[in-house]
Amino acid sequence: MSTLSRRNFALGAVAVGGLAACSNGIGGAGQQTIDARVQRTLSYMYSTYPGTQDLAEKSAGMLVMPVMTEAGFGIGGSYGRGVLQISGTTVDYYSATSASAGLQFGAQQFSHVLFFMTNEALMNFRQSSGWAAGADIEYALNDNADGIRADTTTTRAPVIAVVFAQAGIRIGASLEGIKYTRIIP
């Protein structure tokens, strides 16, 4: 392994490790912190994008990730904690992590909610030991955040993602490659 490769690996490990130290509900009052953030995130989403209330009512369950922190400089990653809600009740806590390499620079935070539109999609998510978001997710919010489309096309998708409240200097937020794992806060 060359010195440059080792340096990039070390920088990546520091970046991903640093993400775990970000303010994502880790620490003494983790469960209460996550619950409070979820409530604020849902209130913001419903008031800013009223169409999401319709998605929530039609969904079998929702995974709410109130704060995802993503950073990269050649090698990067993201981390966040959230909850799985069924019928408005929290049933499990989850962490979300990803690692990436390539042409990237910057950091950002964003929120996202996964709407499981079928019982089968929800069951597959809950029964997996670590579910990875992939290309099969339908995004209901465009890049300009103009609005939500909850039409017959999107409501037939098994999983619909809404990404919002982006802040930072990194362009775009993709959920592909993020791994969700059940945790005990």
Image (cartoon, helix red, strand yellow):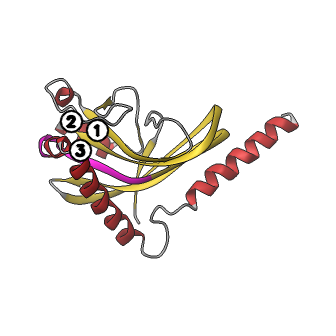
Question: Is residue 6 shown above or below 158?
Answer: below
Vertical relation: 142 (above or below) 70: above
Residue drawn at 33 percent across, 37 percent down? 145
In the picture, measured across the screen, residue 51 lies left or right of residue 133, that is left
Residue picked out by circle 2: 120
Q: Name the residue that disc number 3 marks.
A: 49
Residue placed most toward the observer, 34 or 108: 108
Q: CA distance from mark 3 to mark 2?
A: 26 Å
Residue in view at x 41 percent, y 66 percent: 185
Image position of 74 (left or right of 160): right
Residue plotted at (32% across, 65% down): 35
Q: Main secondary structure of the magenta part?
A: strand
Sequence-wise, which precedes: disc 1 or disc 3?
A: 3
Disc 2 residue type? Glu
At which x and y percent is residue 48?
A: 25, 48
State the CA–CA distance, disc 1 to disc 2: 6 Å
**Residue 150 among those drawn in magenta:** no
Marks 1/2 in contact by CB < 8 Å: the verdict is: yes
Q: Residue 59: say if magenta.
A: yes
Residue ID for mark 1: 124
Query: Which label was assigned to residue 81?
Result: none
Measured as percent of width and height from the top left, residue 65 is found at 37, 52
Q: Secondary structure at mark 2?
A: helix
Instruction: State which quarter of the image contains the N terminus.
Output: top right
For badge 3, the amino acid type reads: Tyr
